[in-house]
Image: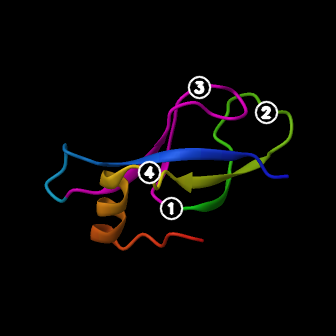
Amino acid sequence: MTKQNIVTLKETTYQKIPELYSVVEKCVICKSRHIHAAEEGNVVAHCINLKNPTTYDLVIDRTNAENLRLAEKYGVKLYE
């Protein structure tokens, strides 16, 4: 079974043209906080000092109304 990280979508506020990114508050592998591209699906783990490259699934938290609003605004595909 693939490990899953639940992510929260965030909008940048430091750029003239806002961009979207996602935040993993507690990584399923290293228990740290990570920043990722705003997407769902299988991605390479950002954990430091992994002996073997590994991947995990990013899943956007659908219980958060702001996540759904940002996903729709930026055209992020939500998988079933």
Q: CA distance from mark 2 to mark 3?
A: 14 Å
What element does badge 1 sit on?
A: loop
x, y percent for residue 33: 53, 30
Mark 4: give few (<14), some (14-19) or many (20+) Cα within 10 Å.
few
Tell me which residue sits at (50%, 69%) in the image: 78
2 and 1 marks in contact (CB < 8 Å): no
| Amino acid, disc 3 | Ser
What element does badge 3 sit on?
A: loop
Q: Is residue 64 magenta?
A: no
Q: Is residue 47 above or below residue 70?
A: above
**Residue sitting nearer the eye, 65 or 22:** 65
The residue that mark 4 highlights is: 63
Give the mark, 4 or 2, whose residue is nearer the N terminus: 2
Q: CA distance from mark 4 to mark 2?
A: 31 Å
The residue that mark 1 highlights is: 39
Which segment is the magenta one?
18-39
What element does badge 4 sit on?
A: loop
Give the mark, 3 or 1, whose residue is nearer the N terminus: 3
The residue that mark 3 highlights is: 32
| Amino acid, disc 2 | Leu
| Amino acid, disc 1 | Glu
x, y percent for residue 41: 63, 62
Q: CA distance from mark 3 to mark 4?
A: 22 Å
Q: CA distance from mark 3 to mark 1?
A: 19 Å
Mark 2: give few (<14), some (14-19) or many (20+) Cα within 10 Å.
few
Kindly indicate the quadrant of the structure image that contains residue 70: bottom left
Of discs 2 and 3, which sits in the foreground?
Answer: 3
x, y percent for residue 37: 48, 55
**Residue sitting nearer the eye, 4 or 37:** 4
Quarter containing the C terminus: bottom right
Tell me which residue sits at (50%, 46%) in the image: 7
